[in-house]
Amino acid sequence: MEIGLTILHVLVSVLLILIVLIQGGENVDITAAFGGVSQAAFGPRGAVSTLAKMTWVLAGIFMATSIALSIMATKHTGGSILENRPAKSAPAPAAPAPAAPSPAQK
């Protein structure tokens, strides 16, 4: 689920960037960007309001996926690899080294 949400988040962010770049200023229509006469294709402010609505929807989805991913990141416990190691047992006692023969025994 986390991978799917991340893919959706990236897709929405790319679409949001593209839609914001397509939009002009307040008085610029999308037809004027492509060399057409302003307000001829979509009517007065038709394209701007549609792009603005798409921007708002994508921004809402972006915020929701951001919050969901941050919640998932805080609930995921990374832990340490040292927590899963086997319990350490006490070391075996060292056997005493054999005594060297004394010079008197030879």
Image (cartoon, grey):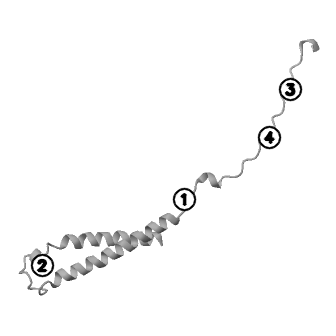
x and y, in percent, of residue 51 in the image: 21, 79
User: How many neighbours does mark 4 have within 10 angstroms: few (below 14), some (14-19), or many (20 or more)?
Assistant: few
Q: Which residue is the site of mark 2?
A: 29
Residue sitting nearer the eye, 66 or 11: 66
Q: Secondary structure at mark 3?
A: loop
Q: In front of the other: label 1 or label 4? A: 1
User: What is the three-letter code of the residue carrying label 1?
Assistant: Gly
Q: Residue furthest left?
A: 37
Q: Tell which circle, 4 or 2, labels the residue nearer the N-terminal end.
A: 2
Q: Amino acid at mark 4?
A: Ala
Of the numbered discs 1 and 3, the one sitting upstream in the chain is 1
Q: Is residue 80 above or below residue 76?
A: above
| Cα gap from disc 1 to disc 4, whole angstroms | 34 Å
Q: Which mark is residue 98?
A: 3
> Taking 95 as reference, is 20 left or right?
left
**Left or right: 38 as drawn, with respect to 57:** left
Distance Cα–Cα, label 2 vs label 1: 50 Å
Q: Which residue is mark 1?
A: 78
Residue located farthest toward the right when viewing the structure as drawn: 105
Q: CA distance from mark 3 to mark 2?
A: 98 Å
